[in-house]
Each structure stands twice: as C-alpha cells, then as structure tokens.
C-alpha cells in the first residue's frame, strides 16, 4: 500500500501540519485504518478509498489516532495535493473529495491549494468566564464585545477572541474543564486568536487545541480557521463583508504554519482556506 507524508499549510518542508496519505490497493477494514492512524500518530491520517467516482470525486476517509472524523482542513488539502500530483499527474486544477460531510472541492492556483468549506452553523454562545478558567487565563484577556461561540463548517470549533498575542501564548488547557464543556456541547476544537501577528505582513495569530488526542495543540487547522472566518464575518470583526487575510499558527509548538483565508458574506457565506503543501516522504506499507 503506497503512502505519502506531506506538510500542509507550510512555507517550507518540516513546517505546517504533518499528514500521512494512504492509497489502499486492496480491501481494508475500518479497524486496520484506525490502527495505521494510531501507528502514524499524526493529528490525522487519510485513506483514498476509490478512483474517481461517477460524481467526479474521490472517496476519502479521515482518521485521528483515536477515531474517524467527518471532515478536517489540512487532511483535505493535503490529500487533494497527493491526488493531483501522484494520481492525476497535474492534469487538473480541481480535485473533488467525497467526505462524510459531503463533497469538498479543492482548487489549485499555481502551487497553492484552496479548500471551500461548507455553509457555517452558529451555536449557542458560551460563558466567557468559563472559557477563561478552561484556558487558565483572566476573563479580562478575552476581547470585550465579542461572543465566545462554537461554529461549524464541518468540524466544530469554539472561537475565543483574545486581546493580545501574549494572552494567546499564556493559554494552557485545563483538560477536566474542557471535557466538561464537550460533554455538554459535543465534540469541538478550541481556537484562540488575537489580531497581533508575529510578522507584520500577516493578520491573525492563532492556536488550536484538539478535542481528541488529549487536547494537544494542532500546528495548522484548516477547518477551525474556516470556522473562524465565519465567526469574523458574522460578528463584523473586520468591519467588512469580504475578507482576505493570513493566519499564523503553529509557532508555539515549533511547526510554523501560514493559512490564507478568503471569505465573503452576502445572502450566504463563501469561505476558502488555502496554503502550500510539501512532500517529505513516501513509501510502501507492509
């Protein structure tokens, strides 16, 4: 079984978020895919389950080390890159992925891929003081005038706006309190951000903590940043209904990542998250 290892939302090799992409050459069980994902121990591992189907897409499954999930951003972009380069031989600029949330298109412009995310769902606002306790920061660190709110374009995230980059860096998840929230609202990653990037040509500084894998920090999270884009538009954060901006993520864990976001809100939302992909390895699974 052929596999490739790629770095997604990276500007160079050994940055961004790691992903293993497998191409099964025979029937493979759900249990074996889960075991492989656990063995790889990346935040996600994907399996290309078919050639191009009648609807033009490729059937793809996404696994964390703990469970299958319906959607995630960097696995979608990384898998589409592998399909385009190694299966389609660069013959197309669009790859369609048939995921458990529906069909997700990924469009390539030069060496950057853009993933289109689903229409967002906005959930009940959460208590800011409770999230401050969960993140072990002061409630004063949470930016006033904006809600702490779960949002989903396929995989939910709790969006927590903070006032400064220092506040973002001071966040430490208290697992018990986070688990209590998840017991009430269901699975959701936890995204904290501030409008204070390290590099002046970027726009936002982001950290994301996963609801799986012991709530470890994720170095680059396309789905969560799509949720953030929806939140920014819904609450008029940038005072504009059309956004183009760049997100820094992963610096805190030594995997610097850069995500490009384009989003609009008119009668509906249109959200794209983009970035670069680098191949770091390939092989045959025995």
Image (cartoon, helix red, strand yellow):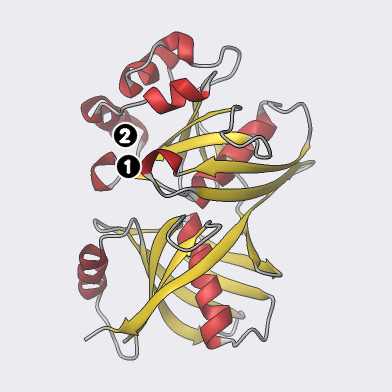
Q: Which residue is mark 1?
A: 211
Image quarter of the N terminus:
bottom left
Image quarter of the C terminus:
bottom left
Cα separation, mark 1 vs mark 2, equals 8 Å
- Label whose residue precedes the other's in the sequence (1 or 2): 2
Q: Residue at x 61, y 13 (%)?
A: 145
Query: In front: mark 1 or mark 2?
Result: 1
Q: Examine the rendering and report whether any part of residue 6 can be seen.
A: yes
Q: Position of residue 94 (x, y in %)?
A: 67, 74
Q: Residue at x 75, y 43 (%)?
A: 264
Q: Is residue 187 above or below residue 180?
A: below
Give the mark count. 2
Q: Position of residue 42 (x, y in %)?
A: 31, 59
Q: Residue at x 58, y 46 (%)?
A: 226
Q: Examine the rendering and report whether any part of residue 125 can be seen.
A: no
Given contact means CB atoms under 8 Å apart, are the residues at marks 1 and 2 in contact?
Answer: yes
Q: Position of residue 251 (x, y in %)?
A: 45, 41
Q: Residue at x 56, y 34 (%)?
A: 198
């Amino acid at each position: 079984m052929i596999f490739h290892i790629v770095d997604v939302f990276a500007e160079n090799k050994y940055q961004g978020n790691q992903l293993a992409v497998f191409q099964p050459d025979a029937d493979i069980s759900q249990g074996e895919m889960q075991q492989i994902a656990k063995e790889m121990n990346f935040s996600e591992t994907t399996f290309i389950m078919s050639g191009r189907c009648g609807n033009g897409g490729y059937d793809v499954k996404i696994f964390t080390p703990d469970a299958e999930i319906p959607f995630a951003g960097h696995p979608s972009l990384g898998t589409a890159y592998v399909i385009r380069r190694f299966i389609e031989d660069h013959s197309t600029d669009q790859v369609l992925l048939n995921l458990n949330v529906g069909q997700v298109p990924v469009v390539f412009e030069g060496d950057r891929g853009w993933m289109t995310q689903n229409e967002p769902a906005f959930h009940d606002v959460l208590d800011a003081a409770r999230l401050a306790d969960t993140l072990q920061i002061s409630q004063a660190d949470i930016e006033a005038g904006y809600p702490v709110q779960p949002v989903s374009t396929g995989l939910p995230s709790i969006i927590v706006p903070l006032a400064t980059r220092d506040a973002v860096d001071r966040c430490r998840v208290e697992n018990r309190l986070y688990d209590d929230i998840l017991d009430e609202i269901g699975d959701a990653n936890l995204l904290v951000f501030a409008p204070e990037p390290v590099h002046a040509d970027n726009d936002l500084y982001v950290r994301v903590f996963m609801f799986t894998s012991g709530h470890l920090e994720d170095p680059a999270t396309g789905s969560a940043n799509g949720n953030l884009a929806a939140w920014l538009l819904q609450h008029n954060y940038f005072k504009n209904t059309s956004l183009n901006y760049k997100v820094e993520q992963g610096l805190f864990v030594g995997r610097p990542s850069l995500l490009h976001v384009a989003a609009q809100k008119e009668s509906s939302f249109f959200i794209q998250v983009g970035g670069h992909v680098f191949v770091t390895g390939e092989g045959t699974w025995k």
